[in-house]
Amino acid sequence: MTRSRINGALAVVTALLVMVGATFVFIVAPIEVEMREIQKVFYFHVGAAWSMFVAFTVTAAYGIVYLIRRNPRADAIAGASASVGWVYAAIVLLTGMLWARSAWNTWWNWEPRLTSMLVLWLMYAGYLLFRSTTRGDARRTYSSVFGIVSFVMVPIVYYSIKIWGSVLHPATKTKWNLDNRMYYGMLLGTLAMSAAYVLLTRLRADVDIAEQEVDALRQEQLFGENAEG
Amino acid sequence: MRATVAVLAVVAFACGVYGLMSVVPVGVNAQEVRDEIDTIIAGSPDASLDEAVEQAVAYLTHEQSRRVRFLFMAYIVIWAALGAYIMSIARRQTRIEAEIARLKDSA
């Protein structure tokens, strides 16, 4: 099976999960008693947050793989994963702000989860900026190190409420005391966002690798012409 | 690649519209209306029941439309962010294809 066929199949799976997830969230899942309609943000907000954690973990893991094996594909996957994770982090921050404004009448609160999340987003913005302004082996090596160091923020964000406590934001749980329909809605939202993450990371990594190959060809052509001249 | 982008764009758009339309018909909860009437009457005992009902429904409808507006915005943010990201990948892909064609021509 070629990569484009796998990507096509993944796109179909993602599409189905998004459609089924949206149906569940908007039609089947009940309206929560306290927060009412705005609570429906929860399903894709949590899904995006989980996928973001996975994305940054993959970035650190492939960064380590690159430093050991010096395989450019590992670096491309690390960069693509960070890029998708950063978009997901932006989604988590923005949907969280809209949720907070509706439920708690405030756009932003400097509580531990939100603050650590903002720091995480800024760190990966720095990572992506570094990648976009450097080339070659230096980019691969230093961005791998950058990705591994930035990963420190992931457990900090995850455990921020357990460590520092919060009045507004609930702690991250592994067991949810939810209505079954809400639980399946959350599961579908998370699966849909995860499938989209896998697809987008693959597409982005392919583009990065193609760009690296074009760069190499261009260099080859340039030096070839110079040698002939 | 283009087929993938097209599928995702259509799904994102469809789900966005679907999500927005399916939330709109949600009505005001009867228990909420009763609780709000009790609050209004407790706050101003001179208010008639009709006035209290009118005020309660107006307040709850306003609050509901406010919550739904934020919910719409949140889902628009999700689909717009993913859509913009997909478009940026597609644009880079097109640029690379053009660059490859140029390199082939000049080789």
Image (cartoon, coloured by chain):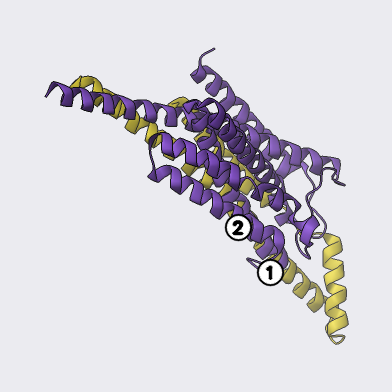
Q: Which chain is purple?
A: A
Check disc 2 and report the residue beneath it: A118
Whether residue B75 can be seen here: no
Q: Which chain is yellow?
A: B
Q: Please state the chain letter of the residue tagged with numbered disc 1 in the rendered image.
A: A
**Side of A137 relative to B35 (left or right):** left
Q: Residue farthest to the left? A: A229
Q: Nearer the viewer, residue A11 or A20?
A: A11
* Secondary structure of the residue carrying numbered label 1: loop
Quadrant containing the C terminus of chain B is top left
Please state the total of marks drawn on the protein image. Answer: 2
Residue at mark 1 shares a chain with residue at mark 2: yes
Quadrant containing the N terminus of chain B is top left
Q: Residue farthest to the top? A: A1
Vertically, is B72 above or below A23?
A: below
Number of the label disc, if any, that sits on residue A105: 1
Name the kind of residue labelled 2 in the image. Leu
- Residue A204, percent across and down? 48, 33
Report the residue at 22% width, 28% height from top.
A222
**Side of A11 relative to A24 (left or right):** left
Whether residue A75 can be seen here: yes
Mark-to-mark CA distance, 1 and 2: 20 Å
- Residue A117, percent across and down? 64, 55
**Side of B46 relative to A64 (left or right):** right
Q: Nearer the viewer, residue B35 or A172?
A: A172
Number of the label disc, if any, that sits on residue A167: none
Name the kind of residue labelled 1 in the image. Asn
